[in-house]
């Protein structure tokens, strides 16, 4: 029986809610489950991905520059509905292969952010496909990979922490390049920032409209904590808007953007920690 080298990565990813070590450590990683083109059986593959704003992410069928497309690409051509695991969430998605200029722009962004993609392309005569995974939004609440409401808060918060840590590292790298002659943020880094800002805004809006009223009704003693958390949401929203304004400029100064990210990081970490301290023990009380 052949050894599946992906299986330990898949198991580690699921056990640690998206955190892995080894080759994928520090990378944006998801698990993509496709339906076999010939067998009809599910197949799960760990893949690096690119944020792309809104309800979609991008993956590249590089196969490390192999002469043939990977099996998962043939599977999604036959069955475009796929399952995506992000660590915090599991959701259904519709796979769309990008064509023409849209594909070329997306691939150029990827290469600018990580030159390894260009190295893979140089190893093969095939054009590496770029695929957009469009989330199919469910009617009900999102499927969070957690066994309790308290754990769900921690899982989602940790996903924001991981992404912000990646952006900070990318910002620091961009700042260094600026000091050696670079003058603007890379296009993919700007997309990463804007996607993070949108996700954080949506998360806090959901808390304000759903979770906090739910808790206020059942636990009146939480009123002071919830009031503080709402106030912090407003402050963080201001910082998010400041960051959006900076990185929305194609000629954004990397050092200015880095300072905005650091301001947001400091306030957001304090907010997440306080929310966990106040809400998780209550939500997970037996």
Image (tube, grey):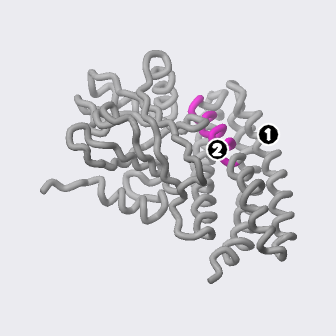
Q: Position of residue 206 (x, y in %)?
A: 71, 52
- Bounds of the magenta segment: 187-200
Q: Nearer the viewer, residue 119 or 9?
A: 9
Q: Is residue 80 left or right of residue 238?
A: left
Helix, strand or loop at mark 1 = helix
Say which quarter of the image contains residue 172: top right
Q: Is residue 50 left or right of residue 60?
A: right
Q: Position of residue 171 (x, y in %)?
A: 63, 42
Can residue 63 be found in the magenta stretch? no
Q: Against 126, is 215 above or below?
A: below
Residue sitting nearer the eye, 262 or 143:
143
Please tell me the numbered disc located at residue 242: 1
Query: Is label 2 in a helix, a strand or a loop?
Result: helix
Q: Which numbered disc, 1 or 2, marks the residue that appears first in the sequence?
A: 2
Residue 70 is tagged as none
Q: Quadrant of the N terminus?
A: bottom left
In the rendered image, which quarter is residue 242 located in? top right
**x, y percent for residue 177:** 60, 34
Q: Quadrant of the C terminus?
A: bottom right
Task: Kindly give the residue lying farthest to the top in the view shown.
Answer: 100
Residue holding disc 2 = 196
Which sits in the foreground, 127 or 43? Answer: 43
Q: Are marks 1 and 2 in contact (CB under 8 Å)?
A: no
Please name the residue shown 63% across and 59% down the image: 157
Numbered circles on residues, count? 2
Dominant SS in magenta: helix
Residue at 56% x, 33% y is: 188
Given this view, does label 1 or label 2 mark the residue nearer the observer?
Answer: 2
Question: Going by the picture, which residue comes out furthest to the bottom?
Answer: 286
Question: Residue 8 falls in which quadrant of the image?
Answer: bottom left
Asked whether, in this view, residue 198 is left or right of residue 58, the answer is: right
């Amino acid at each position: 029986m052949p050894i599946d080298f992906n299986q330990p990565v898949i198991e580690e990813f699921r056990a640690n809610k998206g955190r892995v070590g080894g080759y994928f450590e520090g990378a944006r990683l998801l698990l993509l489950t496709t339906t076999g083109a010939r067998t009809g059986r599910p197949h799960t593959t760990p893949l690096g991905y690119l944020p792309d704003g809104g309800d979609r992410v991008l993956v590249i069928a590089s196969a490390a520059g192999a002469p043939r497309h990977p099996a998962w690409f043939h599977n999604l051509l036959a069955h475009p509905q796929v399952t995506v695991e992000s660590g915090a969430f599991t959701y259904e998605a519709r796979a769309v292969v990008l064509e023409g200029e849209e594909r070329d722009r997306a691939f150029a962004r990827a290469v600018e952010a990580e030159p390894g993609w260009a190295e893979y392309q140089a190893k093969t005569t095939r054009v590496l496909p770029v695929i957009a995974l469009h989330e199919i939004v469910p009617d009900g609440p999102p499927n969070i990979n957690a066994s309790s409401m308290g754990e769900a808060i921690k899982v989602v918060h940790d996903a924001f922490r991981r992404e912000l840590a990646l952006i900070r590292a990318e910002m620091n790298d961009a700042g260094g390049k600026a000091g050696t002659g670079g003058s603007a943020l890379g296009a993919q880094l700007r997309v990463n920032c804007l996607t993070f800002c949108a996700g954080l805004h949506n998360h806090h809006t959901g808390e304000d409209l759903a979770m906090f009223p739910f808790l206020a009704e059942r636990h009146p003693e939480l009123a002071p904590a919830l009031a503080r958390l709402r106030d912090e949401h407003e402050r963080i929203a201001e910082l998010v808007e400041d960051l959006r304004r900076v990185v929305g400029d194609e000629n954004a100064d990397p050092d200015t953007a880095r300072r905005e990210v650091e301001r947001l990081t400091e306030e957001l970490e304090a907010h997440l920690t306080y929310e966990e301290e106040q809400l998780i023990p209550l939500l997970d009380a037996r």
